[in-house]
Image (cartoon, grey):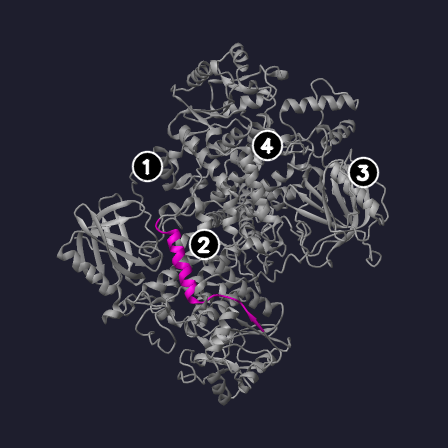
Amino acid sequence: MLSMRPLKPTFKSYLPPLQTDVNKTVQPPIKKLEAKLLPGEIVVNEVNFVRKCIGVDSSQDDLWGKLICTNFKVSFSTHDTLPQQKFQYTNRLLGEHDIPLACVEQVVTVNDAKGKQKVLGSNKKLKFNPMELIIYCKDFRIVRFRFDEAGPESAKKVCLAIAHYSHPADPQLLFGFEFAGKRHHSSTVNGIDPGVGPQTPLFDRPSDWDREIKRTGASEWRVCSINEGYAISPSLPEYFVVPVSLADQDLKQYSGFFTGQRLPLWCWNHPNGSALVRMASIKDPMQQRKLDQRICTAITKSHPKRSDVLKSDLDKTLPNIQDIQAAFVRLRQICVIEPFEETEERWLSSVEGSRWLEYVRTFLKHAAEVVYMLEGQHASVVLQEEEDRDLNCVISSLVLIMLDPHYRSRLGFQGLVQREWVMAGHRFLDRCNHLKKNDREESPLFLLFLNCVWQLMNQYPTAFEFTETYLTVLSDSMWIPIFTTFLFNSSRQHAEHCREFAQSKNITLGEGKTLCFPTVWDWDQQFSRKDQALFNSPLYVGKGTSCIHSGTVKTFKRTKKTYSSTLRGLNSLPNGMLTELDTFPRRNSLAQRLRPDFSVVREAPESPSERFFREWLSRPTDPHGLLLPQLLPSHLRLWRLYFLRWVPEAQISRGGPIMAFHRLSLLADEIESLQAQLRHCSSVGTPPGSTTNPPSSESGRMYFKAHSPDDLPSPPEYLTSSFPFSPVGNLCRRNILGTPLSKFLSGAKIWLSTETLANETL
Amino acid sequence: MEEVPRVPGETVKAVAKDVMYLCPFTGAVSGTLTVTDYKLYFKSLERDPPFVLDVNLGVISRVETISMQIGENNRGIEIVCKDMRNPRFAYKEEQSKLEIFETLTKHAFPLSNNLPLFAFLYKETFPEDGWKVYDPVAEYKRQGLPNESWTISKINSNFEVCDTYPAMLVVPTSIKDEELRKVASFRAKHRIPVLSWIHPESQATIVRCSQPLVGPSDRRCKEDERYLQTILDANAQSHKLTIFDARQSSVADTNKAKDGGYESESFYPNVELNFLEIPNIHVMRESLRKLREVVYPSIDEAHWLSGVDSTHWLEYIRLLLAGAVRVADKLECGKTSVVVHCSDGWDRTAQLTSLAMLMLDSYYRTLRGFQVLLEKEWISFGHRFAARLGHGDENHANSERSPLFVQFVDCVWQMTRQFPSAFEFNELFLITILDHLYSCLFGTFLYNSEQEREVHSKTVSLWSYVNNHTEDFTNPFYVNYENHVIYPVASLRHLELWVSYYVRWNPRMRPQMPVHQNLKELLVLRTELQKKVEELQRDVASSRSVSSSSDHGPSPSHTSTPLYTTV
């Protein structure tokens, strides 16, 4: 069967050219299928003549190849190319068919002849020869392989190897360590020189914090280094910010009373002087009142107007991590596991029943209320949570995104995640369940946060520099265990494991040096510069861009004029370009008269915060000012790109929001090149275009480039509502009952209505 | 006293002071109520800015007195509207107040009170005559008709063959008038199969008609059978003809027992019959009624999605879109001609054919093309607007009423959501159409059929107004891709409740900042920049020509990025 298929030499490198330098010898067209390996990656087991399932009902599109398990990924190597469309971006670390082991949620083997199936764990035995392997992935993919033509023993071995290696017994078995170790040995640093361009601040050194203090004008706050070497708290970063009135000596004394010795952490200062602080609970009830008082006094002292401190207890008002995990599991169930048709009938009720959107709303709402305290009541706020490592991360980062446009730029956002999640000690290792040890600790808090950000982005598309593709790719990166960002429970754990690993591998680390673990923010590791353009929103007309383009992060001074929400006016757009086109339809037009009356009037009992929200919503929004989420159920949507991107039946061909994005990108690109022309001729004084080097569009921010008007006859074929992802081969549900899963015909499945009125004839 | 704003031809009929409007969102407010022959207009100066409620009378479905007691106000009235709201007023029992509500009822239901619909009093003039938008001959010519297989027949020019069909029909060339009459007698309401649309390449056609009068005894009609065979033969690409019966198969069987029915595959060789299982007008009316309960006046935030689910409204939208996709797919991919019918062929049939045509033919997705589509598939082919909407008629419980056209426009809106750059018109255009569906300001949607519709000289067309305000209704994302067939995904994962139409009265449900507004800003920015570049070029060019005889002339390079969109 396999021999019938012509073998095409389509072997392709997934790695940046730098790494393939080793094999410089030109190779003849390869007949053998090999996995493409990263430094430190080794093949554990492999099996030939494997069929990867593409279609549900027929096997005609299926791909033949070799299934390989390495210490990093499940790889499928094939000479066949996918039917229909392909991924529109290439991950440099992963091939089209590859699944990192950390992304494997569940491994299921099936033998239809014996009617058996088994979920494989680490060190499990398999008593039958598998005919089929189904891998359920954490990023919602479901991938199926058939072993009809493969050697039964090797198939079994590969399945067991995948199961085993996707359950690492120890964090140091996560592939990132081998990778970093190898990279440490090789003198050249893989990838692009880190010196180029502005870097995401990692907040692992005092200067990053100093810059934030300066940027927000928090003069009454200071960087504290008592936790250097993690002397005080195992989960706090080495450097954090505290009120100037608290001396190191006091802090050392207080730390013992807090859960996890976690002293309160400063997050941010409002221009009005109010501060946002996050804090763990105080263990000792005897000390509680006194200590609370001291902390609050110190925060008050750091407020220019000595305003009160308000407390927000998140444990009392928000769902806990198990609730969130349960909602997520339910949502995954209806999005990808259950048959499409069966979930179609009661889809909205099922979405509601999952409670995922409800939780998204709860978190946004809570964050908005904290915003009101800071902005509306001019009060400093302390976010309180038992451990200060889960809910506080979500709320503090949401609050900051709403209040400070800096965090809506890509660099600002990355710094925010680094600070409020990674450095603050969010237990990524446990919450991601990378070791698959304790399911009770697993919870998609970070994804919930990204979902909340997406809602804001969906409501205020001009306010964000990055796109939903960026958010999706960021969340997918959680399952590539190469980046330090999402691998550890705390920065101390990171440091310790690195030291131990280096010792065990006889790697000598220089003074103050650690293993060379990349962070996820080094996007060049994963994507080409061209693909990274997918992260840029065409609608973002941020002042942040000038910051980024200049190459250095300036301490930017916030002037009242651009920042204050009270000055949110029509002329707040750059160049005063906002027109009255839409907001004020022409007088005497019938269209206007027929519009609903939005005359805003007082509602009888209205809380001050409600009033604050209503008044804010009644004014035009400044994308570079305060943002508040709209929270009625009709305003909150399911994040379709994330949840439905692999579902073939839900894919809109040449449709979806990407079409608007495409259109906008072309326009933004055109505007950029016009601006470049303008800059060019004003500096050179030559007519634009007449010079030998007209501004190249290659340097533009946009993924889609404006072309000449002549080539516009049809929309790009490859654009779908899943773009840049592709469902092909990534979602093969299997019906356990054995009936064909999808009777789906051109989107038309019909069921009988239960309406009694149907008998009335007409 | 301050005058209420009026449209030309509108006269004030009654005014009453100290009426209380019970706003479900912002509480009670007192003010002056004015009733004209076109609208009721309530204005209160108690609030700043003044509170105004403006309801055109055409939209009123019924007026009911309700019992209440708010201070001095001991009488209450509820005005149930066809557009999902029902404003309530309270007033003190006084002569002037009783009179004004009497006047309101009289003018809200003019036909029940021997008064003309307001469209006949409306005196506005527009530079363009919207009645000229649709010219059947021109439209058929655009489709390449007549051709060797299809001809434009004048057999119905006096509406003798079928009184609910237009005067001009496209039928197979080889069919004689005599045969046509025989076919007419075999089809419900004489609505014979006629061509609606022809594929420019494959020549596959969309043909619409009513159910055949088969009856319980399985009657046959040789002419009808031959007629369908001729339609099949006109398309050389396929050896099949597909009939889509929009109804539920069980209902079709019931109809058969009552002298209606469907084509038997054994009598019609090479024909394939499919039921689309779409429930009838009564089910749809009930569904919209439930939807109103879910969205007005207040919404249940905790159960919003399941509330919408329970109305089945989106489920029916899905059924319709799925059916239309099957029709379009049959033509485009199967290159097969299709016949669409339901019972009478003026409700579900119109929905399906016009949706399929929107998917297949990008012309109908333009502002003008959409007007032509409505004029053709809905108005000229006898969708019974008067009966389905009950213009000016006080009998609100009439079972003939049903929101089929609203449902169709909702489907169109769903398509615009899935394909944001495929339509030249915007959401406001669709909402404007729906508002004037009820308003009785224009003559466009007033009647049941072309024969009844002798309105061209006496009323104004909605398109006169629309085409005088095109910039308000244009979608800035629109790109005119050629031969662009769109298949919406008929799945609840993508269908949404049209909040900005159904829930627009609730100020809290205000939709978020629309992206198209940002696009407009960018378009303006681009124009501005282009202007600046040009200016600079001119400056530089002129300074050069003065200083030196430069070898580069004025550069044409800026033309490489000119406008290819309409701003």
- In the image, taking residue B151 as reference, residue A609 lies left or right, namely left
What secondary structure is found at the residue carrying circle 3? Answer: strand
Query: Is the residue at mark 2 from the same chain as the one at mark 4?
Result: no
Q: Amino acid at mark 4?
A: Gly
Determine contact: label 4, label 1, CB under 8 Å. no
Q: Where does label 1 land, which residue?
A: A606
Q: Is residue A553 above or below residue A653?
A: above
Q: Amino acid at mark 3?
A: Val
Q: Position of residue A4 (x, y in %)?
A: 83, 59
- Residue at 58%, 65% (x, y): give it: B483
Of the numbered discs 4 and 1, the one sitting upstream in the chain is 4
The chain carrying label 3 is A
Badge 1 crowding class, 10 Å Cα cut-off, few under 14, some 14 to 19, many 20 or more, is: few
Q: Nearer the viewer, mark 4 or mark 1?
A: 1
Q: Where does label 4 land, which residue?
A: A551
Q: CA distance from mark 2 to mark 4?
A: 55 Å
Determine contact: label 1, label 2, CB under 8 Å. no
Residue A92 sits inside the magenta stretch: no
Residue A73, located in which quarter of the rendered image? top right
The chain carrying label 4 is A
Q: Amino acid at mark 1?
A: Glu
Of the numbered discs 4 and 3, the one sitting upstream in the chain is 3
Magenta residues span: B273-297
The chain carrying label 1 is A
Q: CA distance from mark 3 to mark 2?
A: 53 Å
Badge 2 crowding class, 10 Å Cα cut-off, few under 14, some 14 to 19, many 20 or more, is: some
Q: Is residue A598 above or below residue A263?
A: below
Q: Is residue A749 above or below residue A127?
A: below
Query: Is the residue at mark 4 from the same chain as the one at mark 3?
Result: yes
